């Protein structure tokens, strides 16, 4: 599903945010991306989302090489992704329903299809009763769940989540993680950036560790019971 | 197709909603656009009406044909008949030597001196009224040349200078109206473009998020194009109302002035096609201004490194 081959991202000034990073994520596979601040996690996500391009190396998504892809085709690539941001990136002027409906709206879904999918997605994150609220009227955790609902609503092939449980309490964080596991089981690939080592241990799946832009560890963790 | 229409209706309604939310700012922009469109439109209307006046002058144009002094009354009648058979001539009036002398006595102020004359030195004069199709100085020139070639004709005279000068002025006026129209069109494009640019800046984050969700540039740009179209449409409609107001304000005074000149001239308003053209111009200028601004802004968002 996702393949990084010797990817380098060098910013002006000669700083290598990513240095020859190679890994692949199979269809329906879930992995945690971890490492200290400044390790290159956000850069890696920005490259997948085509917000930036790699300086060297190759990134393939669903068999498609993203290198040199035309700007006008980026929108169609992004529709294969579900993105969850640490700062939520919700539209404050729009309601929860409208925020979650956005990926469907831009992809050209009909009104009825949008309504049923948005309701199903909001139901998954237990926010169906708040569909008419505006994001600022919600708590940080609820806003993050709106972001998650938005990332799931169009049934993407790959979900990339940057600290998706950062603002959630432990119980809700674990619930959200279980939701990701369920998505993984229906064939959606999931890549989650997190600092939460406890959560990684609880879920027990593949862990990629970045340090100073290098992929220093790629291991399969065993799940610790009791979570 | 249904979905495509749905997207357009949604974008049109959404942009109208945005405009009504910022009612004061939107009204200010619309009024500036209206004034920018009303000025060349009013100037065009003025030129159109002055053209009508100059056409009226063409209608009243008569040629004065002075015959040789040797030509007598029967010969003059024959010549008048010959001229009246010309397709370009609608009427010929003979002014005999005696009538000419009487008029000279009446209007020159030298009645006593004229009485002292033993012979009438004046020639017989034919007043030739061209048909209505002879409506340009060029056609009148051709007719005059034809009359000059006739035997017994001494001088053919017409004060064409006034008509020529007026029509030259009209020609300048029409060109000026076109230039003003184009310049003010650019002004409308600039005004709308600037309004949209500010709107894009305030909604920059929203656009970025929408694009991250997989929106194409067409999708993001569409509501802004409709905003431009609404601004142009409302601006042009108000421009037509402004011109109508100006027309009504000067209609009565113009009628009174026309009456003083014993003229049947009536001030004309813009035709339906003129009004349609103003609205279309406003609409297109609005869309173009919005398109330029939105495309430039989206290009900045798209600039991935």
Image: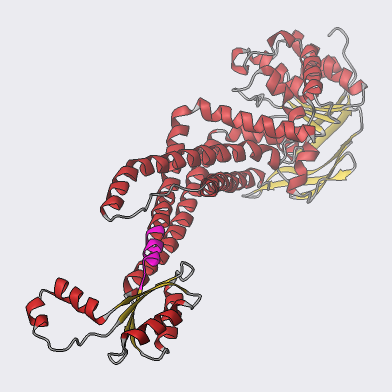
Residue shown at 47% from the left, 33% from the top: B26
Give the residues in magenta. B52-62
Q: Position of residue A66 (x, y in %)?
A: 81, 45
Q: Is residue A169 magenta?
A: no
- At x 56% / y 40%, what residue is drawn? B228
Q: Is residue A216 above or below residue B155?
A: above
Magenta part, dominant SS = helix
Relative to B80, residue A71 above or below: above
> Is B85 displayed left or right of A151 in the figure?
left
Q: How far across and how far down the image is residue B260, in percent?
A: 25, 52
In front: A18, or A30? A30
Q: Residue at x 57, y 37 (%)?
A: B227
Name which quarter of the figure residue B243 lies in. Answer: top left
Left or right: residue B31 compared with residue B121? right
Quadrant in which the N terminus of chain B appears = top right
Q: Is residue B235 visible?
A: yes
């Amino acid at each position: 599903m996702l393949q990084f081959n010797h990817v380098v991202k060098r910013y002006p000034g000669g700083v290598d945010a990513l240095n020859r990073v190679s890994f692949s994520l199979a269809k329906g596979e879930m992995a945690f991306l971890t490492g200290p601040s400044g390790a290159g996690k956000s850069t890696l996500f920005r490259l997948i989302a085509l917000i930036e391009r790699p300086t060297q190396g190759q990134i393939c998504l669903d068999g498609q090489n993203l290198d040199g892809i035309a700007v006008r085709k980026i929108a169609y690539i992004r529709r294969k992704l579900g993105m969850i941001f640490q700062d939520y990136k919700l539209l404050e002027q729009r309601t929860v329903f409208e925020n979650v409906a956005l990926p469907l709206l831009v992809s050209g879904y009909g009104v009825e299809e949008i309504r049923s999918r948005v309701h199903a997605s909001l139901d998954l994150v237990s926010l169906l009763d708040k569909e008419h609220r505006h994001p600022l009227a919600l708590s940080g955790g609820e806003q993050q769940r709106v972001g998650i609902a938005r990332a799931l609503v169009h049934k993407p092939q790959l979900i990339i989540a940057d600290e998706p449980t950062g603002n959630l309490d432990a119980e809700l964080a674990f619930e959200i993680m279980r939701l990701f596991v369920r998505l993984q089981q229906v064939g959606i690939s999931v890549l989650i950036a997190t600092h939460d080592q406890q959560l990684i241990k609880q879920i027990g799946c593949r862990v990629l560790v970045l340090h100073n832009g290098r992929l220093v560890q790629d291991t399969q963790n065993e799940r610790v019971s009791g979570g | 197709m249904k979905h495509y229409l749905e997207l357009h209706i949604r974008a049109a309604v959404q942009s109208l909603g945005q405009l009504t939310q910022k009612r004061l700012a939107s009204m200010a922009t619309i009024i500036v656009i209206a004034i920018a469109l009303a000025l060349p439109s009013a100037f065009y209307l003025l030129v159109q009406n002055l053209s009508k006046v100059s056409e009226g002058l063409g209608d009243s144009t008569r040629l004065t044909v002075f015959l040789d002094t040797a030509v007598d009354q029967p010969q003059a009648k024959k010549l008048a008949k010959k001229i009246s058979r010309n397709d370009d001539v609608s009427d010929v009036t003979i002014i005999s030597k005696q009538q000419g002398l009487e008029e000279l006595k009446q209007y020159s102020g030298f009645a006593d001196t004229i009485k002292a004359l033993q012979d009438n030195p004046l020639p017989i004069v034919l007043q030739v009224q061209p048909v209505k199709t002879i409506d340009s100085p060029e056609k009148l020139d051709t007719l005059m040349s034809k009359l000059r070639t006739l035997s017994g004709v001494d001088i053919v005279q017409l004060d064409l200078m006034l008509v020529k000068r007026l029509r030259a002025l009209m020609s300048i006026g029409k060109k000026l109206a076109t230039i003003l129209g184009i310049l003010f069109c650019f002004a409308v494009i600039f005004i709308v473009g600037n309004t949209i640019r500010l709107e894009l800046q305030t909604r920059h984050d929203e656009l970025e998020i929408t694009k991250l969700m997989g929106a194409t540039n067409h999708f993001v740009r569409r509501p802004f194009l409709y905003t431009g179209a609404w601004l142009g449409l409302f601006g042009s409609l108000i421009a037509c109302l402004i011109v109508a107001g100006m027309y009504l304000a000067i209609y009565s005074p113009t009628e009174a002035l026309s009456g003083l000149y014993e003229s049947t001239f009536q001030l004309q308003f813009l035709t339906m096609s003129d009004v349609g053209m103003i609205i279309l111009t406003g609409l297109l200028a609005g869309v173009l201004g919005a398109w330029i601004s939105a495309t430039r802004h989206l290009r900045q968002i798209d600039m991935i490194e």
